[in-house]
Amino acid sequence: MSTAHDNDAGEKPNGNGSDDQGEEMHGLLAEFETPGALIAAARKVKNAGYTEFDCYSPFPVHGIDPAMGIKMTKLPLVVFAGGLTGLFLGTLMQWWMNAYNWPWNVAGKPAWSIPANVPISYETTILLSVLTTFFGMWAANKLPQVWFPFFRLDRFAKVTDDGFFLGVEASDKRFELEQTKQLLVAAGATHIEECYVDARPEARNVPKWIWAAMTITTMLALIPVALVFKARATKSPDPHYHVFSDMDYQPKAKSDQAFAEFADGRANRGELPSTVARGHLKSDDAYYRGLANGEWITGLPSQLEVTPALVDRGQERFNIYCAPCHGYDGAGQGIVPARVASIGGAWPARNLTDPKAGVIQMRNGQLFNTISNGFNSMMGYASQIPVEDRWAIVLYVRALQRSQNAAESELPAGAQVR
């Protein structure tokens, strides 16, 4: 075993923890031959009552944590708290935006629904957990630390290759130079070196070129942010820049575009004449078109039976597709006309229950056709609502009309008229 003292002037240390130049002792660095020897030494130093020491190795040494007496890190609890905060903030953000600040009811959907907000809440949970882990690790390990006294020792460079070291800091309450040396020798150290703190200010200061590089990097990193804010505040007729085109320009045949692969040069091939796709013949005029012998039917197609379940289904589909314009009561005062009126416009939506509006006089087949193909500014919903659901909506509209236009003599016994 050998000992050495790293000192710029080469003087020997005096007995009070500093050398002749007045440098303060940082501690002792002991080298060991194997990972097993390092674990045994760490256990011996811990059992001797030392707490301010650390082990250094080129790779993780299994079993070193319990040997050093390191307790379980509190980082998992901190990360859990960060994730919980992200979950709360993400959910609160969506509730405030969608249900409180701008409650815009679209297609009868609820303004606030937990399942619809799960993806964003999940992402904010992950985001806050990752950020808490990253910065929590830095804080727990007292990073960034660009200067460390052991870096002065040439032998310490072996820790990145094949060296196993244990460093005892002089700030430990049990540290005494000779006694600590004897303990490390007894623990199997092959080399012990004293380490002193370099008192020169320039030894601890971050080099100016590093500050310059950090400043330039920060300024360059702000350029994309500035461009984003500029793009949000300005308008341009030019198309966006596509750094990563991804699938924006994938080769494919689009409708109404030229396509040289076919003789007529058209991408849209259209339907083959005199052919019907299997299962799409739709020969039942009453069911699919609301017609019988060229006239609108007055009842329901034979395939359907009036049941409470069918009426409930019609109410559900009506609230999704029809209520935004016609309102839940069918009076034509839905959220879309109300919104258009609030900005000075007009969006006519017919009152479905007023006898003067003409809808009550429509036959069921005509009402079904209107839902399917649209009328005036109303779009057709044949591509969105299945046939049976369209008939269910017809049935529910009749129920609405009946509920608001029934004669008093038709009411059940004991019913109150308001």
Image (tube, grey):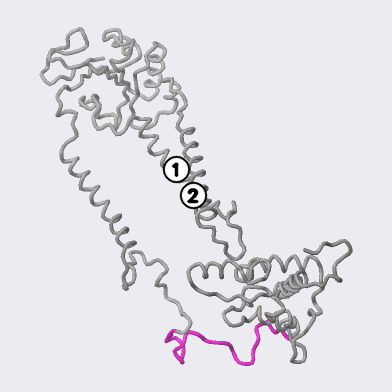
Residue at left 23%, top 49%?
219
Q: Which residue lies furthest to the right in this view?
A: 413
Direction from residue 172 to residue 266 in the image, left or right: right
Residue 45 visible in the displayed image:
yes
Category of crowding for the residue at label 1, using alpha-carbon neighbours closer than 10 angstroms: few (below 14), some (14–19), many (at least 20): many
Magenta stretch, main secondary structure, is loop
Q: Residue 93 carries which label?
A: 2
Label 2: how many residues lie within 10 Å, few (<14), some (14-19) or many (20+)?
Answer: some
In this view, the residue in front, 185 or 410, is 410
Where the N terminus falls, by quadrant? top left
What residue range appears in magenta? 257-283
Q: Where is residue 294 in the image (x, y as percent from the top left)?
A: 74, 92
Name the spot of residue 137 as percent of width and height, x first: 39, 34
**Amino acid type assigned to the residue bearing label 1 in the image:** Leu
Query: Which of these two is toward me, 178 or 100?
Result: 100
Pick the front one: 417 or 353: 417
Within the magenta stretch, is there residue 266?
yes
Judging from the image, what secondary structure is the residue with disc 1 in? Answer: helix
Q: What distance separates the C-alpha of mark 1 from that of mark 2?
A: 14 Å
- Say which amino acid is labelled 2: Met
x, y percent for residue 169: 29, 18
Q: Can residue 279 be seen in this view?
A: no
- Name the quadrant containing residue 354: bottom right
Q: Name the residue under label 1.
A: 128
Residue at the location (27% across, 19% down)?
A: 29
